[in-house]
Image (cartoon, rainbow, N blue to C red):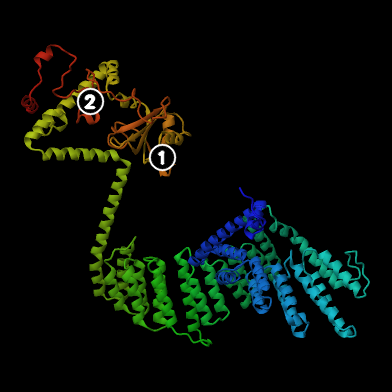
Amino acid sequence: MAEASDSEMGSPENEALISAAQNPSSSDSDSDSDVGEAEELLRLQTLESEVSSDPSKYDAHVEYIKCLRKLGEIEKLREAREAMSALHPLTPLMWQEWARDELTARPEAFLEIEKLYEKGVFDYLSVPLWCDYLNFVQEHDPAVRECSSEGILKARNLFERALTAAGLHVAEGSKIWEVYREFEQAILLTIDENDNEAKEKQVQRIRNIFHRQLSVPLANMRSTLLAFKAWEVEQGNVLDVNSSSMDGISSHVASAYQKAMDMYDARAHLEEQIVRQDISDSERHQQFLNYLNFEQSSGDPARVQILYERAVTEFPVSRDLWLDYTHYLDKTLKVANVVRDVYSRAVKNCPWVGELWVQYLLSLERAHASERDISTVFDKSLQCTFSRFEEYLDLFLTRVDGLRRRISLPGQEEVLDYALIRDAFQYASDYLSPHLKCTDDLVRLHAYWARLELNLNKDLVAARGVWESLLKNSGSMFGAWQGYIAMELEAGHINEARSIYKRCYSKRFAGTGSEDICHSWLRFEREFGTLEDLEHAVRKVTPRLAELQLFKLQESKSTAASTDQIENPHKKNAREKRKSSSSRTDEQPPAKRQKDTAQNPKKVDGKGRIELENIVASNEEQELKAKDDKPDDMNKRQMKGPSHEKNKYLDQCTAFISNLDLEANYEHVRDFFSDVGGVTAIRILKDKFTGKSRGLAYVDFSDDAHLAAAVAKNKKMMRGKKLSIARSDPKQKGKGAGHSNDQTGTVGESDSKESGQISSSKAPQARRDDNFQLKGRNTFAVPRNVRPLGWIDKKKKTEEETDEMPKSNDEFRKMLLKS
């Protein structure tokens, strides 16, 4: 390959390539910075769309401002900050950054930056922000910098405002005092040395600031005392600057200093608790509350207010803190402007708290604010989202209350029109009716509205229109009709009230409202009507009351039936089966019924049924006799039958459980009776077709004592349901205590818990031997040890097989009908 010439090697392109090859990290860092900037731009676009779509997202505003500040987008950054400050309060750090950024970009814009500081110190209490504000004014305000009389006066007023806002801050308030002293000492240096009067006056001003600071319980008070002594020495006084003793200091200053020290010592441990870094926010919140209780017990409102300001700065969205703070100011301070400003900040931090808005409206009325200011605050409150619609109702009622008071009271500066009240009520009705339909709150709103229309506006037609509009949407409410009648009675309109009774007495109301309206009409006629009116009301009301009584009776029967169905499902099943069987038999033609009767003894009817019942009774006597004669043989036969699994529980101590949770399993039942003990087996009844639990179970116990303890747990809760537990008695068929023929799951002491079903060894097995017993669903009214007619034992190949051949249908039917 040919070597490159010197001219080619020295070209800018080649030099760049050589530089990139020699410094690969530099090229990589440039590419990384490009990628990082692209990611920031993409993130900026995402945040911008998020803020524009939902301006209420505080965190999105914060991240958007951070991203713009990082990219250096000054104009967009200013717009973003203004948009956020219009909706949300900014933290002190955000105000500091904003002011510094504006000072760097526009150092000549003093007034705009000064307004930023004013907004910042209004939002939250912050000593660092106040110090920045004070230093900014001293450095950039021309009048203050030149120490003109106007500038000095402006600065002193600003320093006094700072002391009022933060001078009592125990931990950081001394910083404001120090900046104030330094400012006055700087002024002292500008005074002509020959002007002794002016110098002495300024020295006394500085001394007064020292005295004021030494009387306030602040951190580092001993350092302040030493600084004061050193300054006094500079003024020619003899003091020991290395000692914290009060020698050489006036008695009143020494006394005030000692009192302040005692106050600080009493608060030092509380200050330590609220600034600890090893505790959670909830614990710090509680420490603030403890501190507030201490200050309130001390009885200094100014100190309490400073501490509240510190608390809400630390927890700006604490609903309880703002409510406590505003209530304290309403009760104690009662300075209209201060209370108003605090409320405006409270609703800006917690706009979702309806009670704050209500108290804000009351504070404005208390301060005699203009209708324009009050209506502006009210409109802002309706733009907020509250957790309960009752909070909106409280706002509307508070607004109406204020309008009513100002319209009713004479000598008001503003003349208000009643139309404002009507508009407020109409707005409330339109806004709340869909959400508070058929509620007492809605009735209360319309009752208030109708009363003001009648009494304040003197418009009876409008008052009736209010009630009629309510009845149109909530006519099923007893309270609405009752309120309408009460208004007419209050106005003395007897006939109109009677007409309303006639309209509503036959309506159906919730609870006892239907009966109450009838009795109310009768009482009304006794007190206001004639004898004919009373008799007419009786004729109307009596059948209505009887109808209501009948309805209640039917309803109670229905409830009792449903309850009985839940508690005794076996009864219903048996009735339905009998009804179903009977209906099917009736629907069949006669020939078919005869055929079925011959083939299935369960369907025997009429005379054949009577004959079968006689056979049943006869065989029951034989069975009892056989049992008395040969108990051992009888027990053997029972053990061999298919019903052995059920029969073996008859002599045990068994509890029947109903209303069992459908998801409950054997372990749940066993755990429920763990305190009782003695459980030997558990059988959960399941549906024959679905295999799911029916909510019923049998539990066997080892002895009667354990069973009695289990029954004592009747009505106890298990898995959220109240169980019904009773002693099982299989002899009482159909009472919910007998054994069910549906599938059951059985678990004993030695049962396996994995399957939850009956083991094959315990499952009933159908056998065709001489001891076969038919019970339960297999027969209809067939007792034990009675074989179905026409059945032959296949194992016995005897003479009976040749002599007694199976009969035909006609022969079998004739045998049954033989009398």
Looking at the picture, how far across and down is residue 146, in whole percent? 78, 82
Query: Which three-letter amino acid code belongs to the residue tagged 1?
Result: Asn
> Which residue does the image show at 22% across and 68% down from the upper left?
539
The residue depicted at 19 percent of the width and 40 percent of the height is: 579
Q: Residue furthest top?
A: 798
Q: Earlier in the sequence, mark 1 or mark 2?
A: 1
Residue 594's label in the rendered image is none
Residue 763: which quarter of the image? top left
**Does residue 178 appear left or right of residue 200 in this picture?**
left
Residue in the foreground of this view, choosing between 287 and 540:
287
Relative vertical location of residue 755 with respect to residue 337 in this rendering, above or below? above
Mark 1 sits on what residue? 714
Q: Is residue 702 left or right of residue 95?
A: left
Other residues around mark 2 within 10 Å, as few (<14) / some (14–19) / many (≥20): many
Q: Is residue 534 left or right of residue 707?
A: left
Do callouts 1 and 2 mark residues in contact (Cβ within 8 Å)?
Answer: no
Position of the C terminus by quadrant: top left
Foreground of the two, 109 or 200: 109
Give the residue type at disc 2: Leu
Q: Point out residue 534 in the picture as x, y percentages from the top left corner.
A: 26, 72
Q: Is residue 363 left or right of residue 396?
A: right
Circle 1 crowding by C-alpha within 10 Å: few under 14, some 14–19, many from 20: some
**Looking at the image, is 480 positioned above or below residue 199?**
above
Name the residue that disc number 2 marks.
Answer: 774
Q: Residue placed at 86% from the left, 70% from the top? A: 228
Give the structural element (helix, strand or loop) at label 1: loop
Q: Nearer the viewer, residue 657 or 431?
A: 431
Q: Is residue 103 above or below residue 601?
A: below
Where residue 321 sits, quadrant-wise, is bottom right
